[in-house]
Amino acid sequence: MFKSKLIALAAISFLIPFSSVAKAQSAELLHWWTAPGEQGALHVISQALASSNPTIDLISVSGGGGDNAMTVLQAKALAGTMPFIAQIEGAHIDAWDAIGLIQNLDTIAKRENWDQSLYPLAKQINQNDQGEYVALPLTLHRMNWLWVNEPLRKQLNIAPPKNWPELLAAMQTAKSAGITPLSLGSDEWQVALLFENLTLSLHGKDFYQQALVQLDPTALNSDKMRQTLHAFRQLSQLVGRHIPHQPWNEATSQLAKGEALFQIGGDWILGELLAADVAIPDTINCYAMPGTEQHFVYNMDSFIFFKINTIDKKSQAQIIEQLSSRTLQKQFNLKKGAIPVRQDIDLSDFTSCQKRAAAAFTKASESGLAIPSMTDSMALPPVAQRAMTNELFRFFMQSNISEQVLIERLISIAQAEI
Ligand code: BGC
């Protein structure tokens, strides 16, 4: 249905050049893991590659969700200074593969038995239409989590909410008691992520797929969509005007400190909590977003490897093999808060939230309820995803934008992509 497209080049001012100085025999790894929990996970990679030849320089691009990093990656590609390795997600893999700049990993995948070790979903996301591996998967994140400050919840005498009306009521109770109901980062994707969770919570998988994956104009212009937008506006009235200018991980620290009752979002939040030594599940517990218990909204981080002729092929292969190893993938995910993409990793050392995520993933996959995140580049081509996110954010922040105006804008985005 959709054509692969690259996002138009914007500014490159997000680049933090603190970690990269061009040297002979070094290769770059470009990523957006800049929060403390993410840095802890990244450290597993830099430790593992510490003695590699070439050495790996980390290029950090601030901005959770990766939009800034993708802009920098395009700028580097246009300038002919591609990194060797880049963090990437879903639809972006196809876009880079389509223009022929990234490596085919089939030989390594065969040698390392990726076909046997990876979950089928990881294969599907990291292979192109010809069934060739063009990316290496690293994490499987669940996006439909409600993170709850348990001491606060008990103090407010609130039962874990089971559906949207109960969640709304719980947030109203917190607000009346002078407690921030929902901690939220101010990035656009943070707000769009609330919308996708609400859509699934209120109307289930089929509607989610029609509206947010297929961008079906009839679904976008339906009563179900209007109901979702109504709930989204209620949420914005509850928290919207008070969003502090902060990244998602500062919202997580508000939650951990007991300054907010809830946070909705992917399990990189767990990585952040673990890095801050927060007790899981006693202080912060994970519940599925109310109304989405049977579902697993996924997001997967991968690496792509650019065709670089300054490093010999054997060294490149060694690095890729190391990154795909069972040990590295286990240690990385333990810190990242995610679950591994390899099925042969023992989860007994993982937290209760990660074990529940893994069980939820298996069950949801069997029942066709594992669904891609629209917000986090798993469902739509990059241009459409950015446009949708931007429109949803504007609607959330500006109460003078009506439901009908937003619906018309979303339909225009859909029509540009069909
Ligand atoms: C990535 C995660 C990352 C999160 C916040 C998501 O797009 O998949 O790995 O932790 O953004 O930065």
Image (cartoon, rainbow, N blue to C red):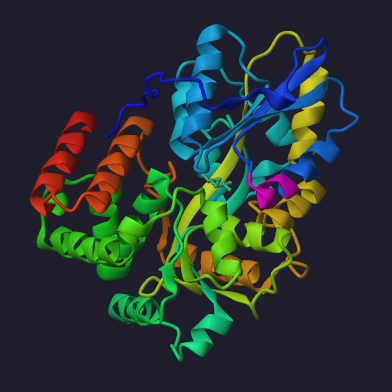
Q: Quadrant of residue 232?
A: bottom left
Using the image as rendered, state which of residue 284 and residue 330 is in the foreground.
284
Report the number of numbered marks.
0
260 vs 196: above or below: below
Q: Is 246 a magenta residue? A: no
Side of 263 relative to 209 (left or right): right
Q: Is 37 a magenta residue? A: yes
Using the image as rendered, state which of residue 169 and residue 128 is in the foreground.
169
Q: Quadrant of residue 195?
A: bottom left
222 vs 18: above or below: below
Side of 136 relative to 42 (left or right): left
293 vs 93: above or below: below
Residue 241 % position (x, y): 31, 57
Q: Residue furthest right?
A: 51
Side of 26 relative to 341 (left or right): right
Residue at x-position 28% and y-position 60%: 236
What's the magenta region?
35-40
Residue 372 % position (x, y): 41, 51
Using the image as rendered, state which of residue 156 and residue 150 is in the foreground.
156
Side of 251 relative to 91 (left or right): right
Using the image as rendered, state which of residue 135 and residue 43 is in the foreground.
43
| Quadrant in the picture for the N terminus | top left
